[in-house]
Amino acid sequence: HYKLLPGKIFVLDLNDSRMKPVELRMPRNFDLETFNPHGISLYTDPSGKTPDNLMRGCTPVTHKSLVNDILAVGVDSFYATNDHYFENQFLQSYVEILLFQPWGNVVPTEVKEVSQGYYFANGINMSPDKRHIYVADLFDHNVHVLERKEDNTLTRVKVNDLIFQ
């Protein structure tokens, strides 16, 4: 069993045969007490560079709507999925499930809604050419393909239904 430790992230180099997790060091001024990551993403710049074992240049973004997964699309930019509409745990657990409405959405760095209509927007990722964003809708059993615009808005291209056997 793995024990979750608040305020810590570990790096695992999949090219290293030892496969030993290494703790990512946080900057001294980083607020570890309120750091509670759910989704995580690593931005790789166009030259192929990724961070070393020190978390650098991280500007925390706190907003009530950032609740599920995150996708880094630049040094200071991201998209995040919201799987719930209400902040209240009771309303999330009972009302949203009973009403079963597509209230989940996707927000970019500016924390403004750019795509909506998800029953449970869970995972998010980007195409290798960085032109499309993929959003998994867990309860609706599909993956949405969205075209990414220069201003971070998203346009729905298609929806791929998933079939579970």
Image: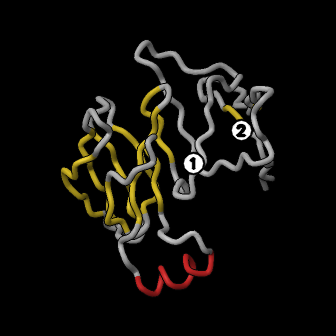
The amino acid pointed to by label 2 is Ile
Question: For this view, does 68 lie left or right of residue 118?
Answer: right
* Picture colour scheme: secondary structure
Residue labelled with disc 1: 39
- Tell me the quarter of the image containing the C terminus: bottom left
Which residue is nearer to you in this view: 91 or 122? 91
Above/below status of 129 relative to 31? above
User: Dot 2 lies on which element?
Assistant: loop
* Residue ID at (39%, 53%): 106
User: Where does the image place residue 33, in percent across and percent down from the top left?
Assistant: 80, 46
User: Dot 1 lies on which element?
Assistant: loop
User: Where does the image place residue 21, in percent across and percent down from the top left?
Assistant: 74, 33
* Residue ID at (59%, 24%): 15
Q: Earlier in the sequence, mark 1 or mark 2?
A: 2
* Residue ID at (44%, 42%): 110
Res 22 visible: no
Question: Hey, which quadrant is residue 109 in on the image?
Answer: top left
> Is there CB contact under 8 Å for labels 1 and 2?
no
Residue labelled with disc 2: 9
User: Where does the image place residue 143, in percent across and percent down from the top left?
Assistant: 32, 57
